[in-house]
Image (cartoon, coloured by chain):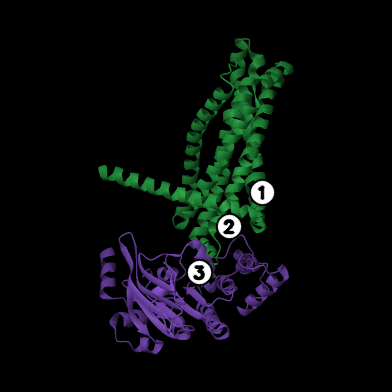
Chain colours: A green, B purple
Amino acid sequence: MLATIGATTINTLDALGAFSRFSWKTVAHMPAASMRRKDWKLLMPQFYLIGVRSVPVMVITGVFVGLVLAAQAVDQLRAAGLESRMGVLVNLSLVKELGPVLAGVMLAGRVGGALTAELGTMRVTEQLDALRVMGTDPVRYLVVPRVVACIVLAPLLTMYCNLMGSIGGWFVAVIVNHIPSEPYTYYTAEAIEKWDVYSGLAKSVVFGGLIGLISCFKGFTCRAGAEGVGRACTSAFVTSFIVILITDYFMLRLMQDMYNTIWGFKPLL
Amino acid sequence: MADKQNNPSDGNTPIIQLIDVHKRFGTHVVLDGVNLSIPEGQTLVIIGASGVGKSVLIKHIVGLLQPDSGQVYYRGQRVDGLSEKKFSKLRRNFGYLFQLSALFDSMTAGQNVAFPVEQASKKSRAEIDRLVATKLRLVGLDGVQHKMPTELSGGQKKRVALARAIALDPEVILYDEPTTGLDPVRADVINELILRLKNNLRVTSIVVTHDLSTVFKVADRVAMLMGGNFIFDGTPTELRESTEPRVQRFISGRASEEDLLELDGAA
């Protein structure tokens, strides 16, 4: 029993150390890569794969989260006579929490799995070794563009998710439940500050970076064979998902403390 | 780590030298004090059973693996322990044909061959295209530039990978199981190519294989790896005439009593 706990602890610390070295190497390559025109060309295909092809998933996620949030809240708020404030609840939940977290989770599922599978297959078919033998650092050539694309595109995809969620919420409130549009939008605009939007987007930047790093790391360290690649993909998604939730809590606390220190507590009701 | 002063064989320096190289994975000892010295221009074929550590050995030469202890030299310069950045420049002197070809699936055959040139030089597109055509012609495949690796046969993949390996005119070419998975005729084409590259480009070649047709066709020298060390080192003729029972068993393809006992145990 003790031996198992000890072995698990050592393995976990070992993996954490390897991940930290991998992340540091990736970050250390970024300044030089940003100066090389050759490296810019590597970004465009990643922008397409990670960004453009994720838009439909983000749109569907955003719309339905907005619809569900509004549909859940409408009866209770109407009973309390607060239905005109429904936009505050729906949109604040979206921009601060659900938008960044759900966009992050969808990105981890759609893109993270694909990145791990691609790099894992390259590893087991010796393509990573081939890159090294030809004098090209696989981290610079493969990981940096993918992680940069995740960092840049995660907030953009989150904005799509937020926008579509807002439209979904407005649709349920105004079109389905006949809540007047003007007070709905007025109270929403009153309650939501730039800080709320930016803090959500700041989270998504961090989530994007973590998803990129975790997925690439899992691909680079996956075991041989189809089973190894499959396991790495599952592990990349599960790890990204858990890390997103944990990071979300700590970033929320940090953002709240920063807001309260600068502007003080603001009641919404 | 990398210094010329440490080289024990100044004077008549071999192009590659391994001294007392040890490597283990977990508790499994793969290389147990391997010593190897390869003169320039020689074609050395390393033979041995599957999983004996032949590929592991040549990966030490290009720094894909680092020894647990021991030294690796290239042209008198100690290279084990070199940083990845320093090694990446040095690796341009090596061509490496991987067992699975390791062509990049997202690129065409032409882009694969062009890749090392684009990374290492500032040649124009037209110059690179000409070079790619020349290298593919050398392996008898000019015209497949626009094909994806999935559209090529196993033998064609190996030849495109070989064209890529020689794209930067390396001094040393390492072949990892070059004929594995090919029919005897295609395997002979690859053996012929190894010979031609040796004669035309005057490169030093290290071939890892368990294919005896490769041994007797291309080797100047043969070394047999077993139990973490070399049990034979000599010419192909000496290999054929060797009285060492393990060598004889390998070249005649006979299983030992021990191997058969394992089989009985499994049954």
> Looking at the image, how many numbered discs can be counted on the residues?
3
**Is circle 2 on the same chain as circle 1?**
yes
Please state the horizontal and vertical placement of residue B118, each as a whole percent of the image.
Answer: 64, 66
- Badge 3 amino acid: Phe
| Nearer the camera: disc 2 or disc 1 | 2
Please tell me which residue is depicted at 52% across the width and 67% down the height of the picture. A133
Chain on which label 2 sits: A
Relative to A236, residue B241 above or below: below
Chain on which label 3 sits: B
- Badge 2 amino acid: Tyr
Q: Is residue A123 left or right of residue A85?
A: left
Please state the horizontal and vertical placement of residue B53, each as a whole percent of the image.
Answer: 38, 69
Q: Quadrant of the N terminus of chain A?
A: top left
| Residue for badge 3 | B98
Please give the label number shown on residue A141. 2
Nearest the viewer among B251 and A53 is A53
Few, some or many residues within 10 Å of mark 1 (<14, 14–19, 20+)? few
Relative to A164, residue B193 above or below: below
Q: CA distance from mark 1 to mark 3?
A: 31 Å
Please give the label number shown on residue A48. 1
Q: Check contact, mark 2 vs mark 1: CB within 8 A.
A: no
